[in-house]
Amino acid sequence: MRIVRTIHELRDALQSVRTGGSIGAARVGMVPTMGALHEGHLSLVRTARAENDCVVMSIFVNPTQFGEAADLAAYPRQEAQDVELAESAGVDLVFAPSVAEMYPTGFATAVHVSGPLTEVLEGAGRGSAHFDGVATIVSKLLLAVLPDNAYFGQKDAQQLRVVQRMTQDLGIPTRIRSCPTLRDEDGLALSSRNALLSDTERASASRIPSALTAVTAALAAGDISVSRLRAVAEEVLVGGNLDVEYVEIVDPDTFESVKFVERPALCAIAARVGTVRLIDNTLLVPQR
Ligand code: AMP
């Protein structure tokens, strides 16, 4: 496995993958991450490994998608361990650039996806700059690698949708692959931020997946009213030491609000546990 730090080195390495060896047209898969790798990230790598000849992982804590300086400063960084984990999961090439490599002096371009997709939920909670930061860095990464396939987690469902919209609109020739959320035994979605939780905070955090499970159960019992389903979630969340930012049920494609779950809808939650902000979601599928 190789580690490269500049776009130039990355392009050189990929050039030899694409033209060299016995593989005439090597398929390249990409897994963009911010590091602090866990099994969720590695599950994306395994899917990429199975579907491509060469797997590239980027590790870059993208400053432009963080609203709060303290959140960026606290974000866990562990490159040496990440490199070992990436290699053991089957990554061929790690791209770990500096901030100056991705945002050189004079950088003045942003990719903006407009509409409710970027204005609600995470767009409202983290500020409008968040998805501009995401769309800009993912565009840069995809244009640097030009992978056949790129792998994103449903854990960040709104980000996944923004990336799908952006690649389609810009005509970036990469297939965006959606991968399921990996969870710990207590149901908590794996996240790099979980490392920042104390034991008591973690117990509170596990109410987030419990709330999603309760909503799924209420829907299965026949309740399709969004206001009542949200109340079911809020009742579970209220007992923990959680600062709930939103509980929303939206159309999974447009992220517009719905009143009744008559078609598949996304239930998404964001809450702070102490200083740590966590998000999770589940797809609600009504019975016919
Ligand atoms: P991050 O490093 O948090 O930016 O995440 C990198 C990629 O891993 C994103 O596409 C995430 O959606 C995905 N991811 C994060 N957590 C999980 C998880 N628990 N299960 C599956 N994918 C995940």
Image (cartoon, rainbow, N blue to C red):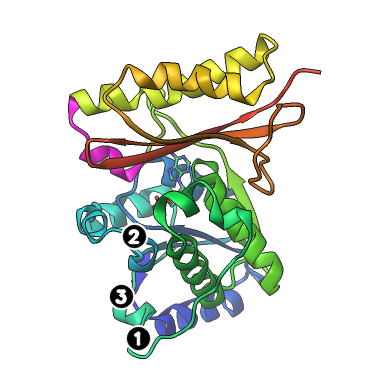
* Type of amino acid at the residue the image marks with label 3: Val
Residue 280 visible, this angle: yes
Secondary structure, mark 3, is: helix
Q: Please identify, in this view, whether the residue under mark 3 or under mark 2 is nearer the observer.
A: 2
Marks 3 and 2 sit apart, C-alpha to C-alpha, by 16 Å
Per the model, the C-alpha gap separating discs 2 and 1 is 20 Å
Asked if residue 194 lies in the magenta stretch, the reply is yes
Return the x and y of residue 245 as percentages of the image width and height. Answer: 40, 38
Q: Position of residue 159 (x, y in %)?
A: 53, 53
Dots 1, 3 in contact, CB < 8 A? no
Report whether the residue tagged 2 is closer than 8 Å to ligand 1: no
Q: Residue furthest bottom?
A: 106
Q: Which residues are magenta?
A: 191-199
Identify the residue position indicated by label 2 in the image.
Answer: 67
The residue at the point 42 percent across, 81 percent down is: 7
Q: Residue furthest top?
A: 221
Residue 194 vs residue 131, the one in the foreground: 131
10 Å crowding of disc 2: few (<14), some (14-19), many (20+): some
The N terminus appears in which quarter of the rendering?
A: bottom left
Q: Earlier in the sequence, mark 1 or mark 3?
A: 3
Task: Please name the residue shown 51% across and 20% down the image.
Answer: 231
